[in-house]
Amino acid sequence: MKKKKTSTLLLFFIVLVSGLLFACSNGNDNGDGSVELRFIAANHPWTEAIEPLLPEFEKETGIKVKFEKYFEDQLTQKLTTEFTAGSTSIDLFMMRPLQEGKLFNLNGWVADISSYTDDADWEYGDFTDPSVNSLKADDVLFGIPIVTEREILYYRKDIFEENNIEVPKTVEELMNVAKLLNDPANDFYGFVARGQSAAAVTQFSSFLYGFGGDFFVDGKATLDTPEAIEAFQFYGDMLREYGPPGVLNMSWPQAAGLFGQGKAAMYTDADSIYPNLTDPEKSVVGDKVGFTLFPAGPNGQTPYNVTSWGLAVNSKSENKDEAMEFIKWATSKEVVAKLQDNGVPGPRQSVWDNQQGTDTFPSELVDVINQANAIGREYDRPLVIKVNDARDIIGTVIVAAIQGEDVEAAAKAANKQFQELLDDEK
Amino acid sequence: MGMWIERHLKFIFLFPSIIFVLLMIAYPIGYTFYLSFFEWSMSSLQPPEWVFFDNFKALLFDDPRFWPAFFRTFYFTALALVFQTVLGVAIAILFNRKFRGNQLVKTLFLLPMVATPVAVGLVWLLIFEPSIGFANQFLNSLGINPQLWIASPEQALPSIALVDTWQWTPMITLITLAGLSSIPSEYYEAAAVDGANSWQNFWKVTFPLLLPTIFSAVLLRVIDAIKQFDLIYAMTRGGPGFSTETLNIYGFVNGFQYFKLGYTSAILVLFFMIVLGISSIIMILRKKTEVTL
């Protein structure tokens, strides 16, 4: 009797251990030979818009797609950890080309897919140049753009009309209008934008370019050039003098929220967040929002025009062809048109030129996007490997400027640190 | 086989927990120490490179963010702890008296402790909102100017310490209450015979006998407050600027945003030493205050 008990215990252990082992070794192949792709995606309107279309793809090709969704920071962590461990189970994934493209490419985590581009039906040439360039390194193509965005100026049409004010076309006019409309006593502010250190860097970039500055040129950090300092000073002054209290803690959700609550006259940020400002559920100023091109600086009009998300294939995936099959489908003209119809600004020029692809966008916004597509710069943050470090370094100058501290000293200190980072990466 | 299992049954039952401790506690700590001697960033394909004490040197002498984070950690801990201890002990002494609804108040008072720090942080984020938040409306009704709270680099850390105090004062109270109930009533009777007033009762009897308990409570809270992460991360992520970046947050940023694993390990090793040192000091102090009954 006693013996029986102990052998039951033993059996229990064996079952437990073998169960664990089996759980670790689930393959990608389904029993019937069809392929299931493991797709690591972001929580993003793009993902939400494509999921309902998925059955079409699965029916057409017989390939199954399994989604895993994460918020963007967790997504980066998830991918980095799995790739470092040499994971082969991820087949394709969403990524932010400007944030992690360089790192992923350098580490060899993304497959070169340039050999797939000659498919005539897919028409690779239709993607706008800036949108593809951020997913290229030399001759290697390591991703396909899916979401693009540009920095634009949002403004309150009703208030501009009431006060008989022209929409600002230069940064100088921007400051004058902000000054005029700023009314802190009544909790209304002339201007709002991101003030949270690292988050602000991307939205500051268009100002930086407009003043004639850049993050670095030919491997030399240029955060302390007179142009850059002027840009930092301007951005800081705008937010300190005419911005809301607490702007130092504002990334886009807070800034967009404030504008959506009718507490600011103007707001610069990415065009892709416009639904947050026009959706009556999130905003009380929905029909009063105006869109215009990002104002020109002393050095001209250069808003960023970037690929915020792309699709890439894991270089170690065993189902690369099937993964590409999915990417081609998801970035085909028809699907991009449908996604864009859901408010996801895509990378295809033909869709922007087409009535159907822009129907749901406010027509003013389509004009602005088309103009910005032509003049925009392809990056909104320094194109380095350690983007997060770099953003934190640059963010310190933005914070100093907003607080009214010595911008030049902060810029000099940041420039030194940034140069060290650049030297490290060589 | 059966006999063997029979004879070693006690080890077999212990086995899972030993494996757990080795795998989940001892190994990670050891590996962190080991890693702290390497330069290893995920942003390169190179394997970890042995650099001996370079990470520590860079941290202590070259890193503009390390020392501020170090002092912030202590500033935050001291701030939170002073208020929590004074308030916690005072409230415990109050609750120790008999009054109507005593049990109900005690239970209600413990509620903040049960809440998830991240949820607490998010709620206080709304309370601290400078233009529409409750905190400023409250100040307003008292005729005090609105404050920036966590949006100001100077006020951010004290504001978070305030939330920490709100959440964890009950824990000090709880432990102190347990300590109070363990003081034998004979001492008070003896004091009464000697004609002690209530003031003397407190300072000569209650307080000395309570001190070891208070030290235990403080020890637990010091360790918790020093490694406070959830609240800070949920409320400010170390901002505005770096003004709420404590050592723990700095470690997280280095590890999971910059992917500098060796460097992060060095931060955590130093952090580990600091916590160890402080706990030992408090333990020694506690031993000294212990009264043999």
Image (cartoon, coloured by chain):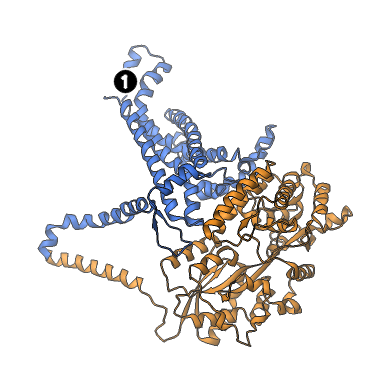
Tell me residue B248's x, y (percent).
47, 46
In this rendering, the count of numbered labels is 1
Element carrying mark 1: helix
Amino acid identity at mark 1: Tyr
Q: What residue does disc 1 label?
A: B187
Residue at horizontal 85 percent and vertical 55 percent from the top: A160
Q: Choose top left, top right, bottom left or bottom right for residue B130.
A: top right
**Horizontal arrangement in the rendering, residue A129 relative to residue B285 (left or right):** right
Name the colour assigned to chain B in the rendering: blue
Query: Vertically, is A19 above or below A225?
Result: below
Query: Vertically, is A362 above or below A114?
Result: above
Tell me residue B257's x, y (percent).
51, 56
Tell me residue A29's x, y (percent).
41, 81
In the image as oriented, which residue stretches furthest toward the right?
Answer: A164
**Horizontal arrangement in the rendering, residue B171 relative to residue B7 (left or right):** right
Mark yes or no: residue B116 visible.
no
**Chain letter belonging to callout 1:** B
Residue at horizontal 63 percent and vertical 88 percent from the top: A120
Query: Vertically, is A300 above or below A373?
Result: above
Name the colour assigned to chain A in the rendering: orange
**Horizontal arrangement in the rendering, residue B105 relative to residue B11 (left or right):** right
Q: How many residues crowd mark 1 within 10 Å: few (<14), some (14–19), many (20+)? A: some
Residue at horizontal 43 percent and vertical 55 percent from the top: B261
Query: Vertically, is A134 above or below B201?
Result: below
On the rendered image, what quadrant is the N terminus of chain A found in? bottom left
In the image as oriented, which residue stretches furthest toward the left?
Answer: B3
Residue at horizontal 26 percent and vertical 57 percent from the top: B16
Mark yes or no: residue A224 visible.
yes
Tell me residue A277's x, y (percent).
72, 60
In the image as oriented, which residue stretches furthest toward the top?
Answer: B195
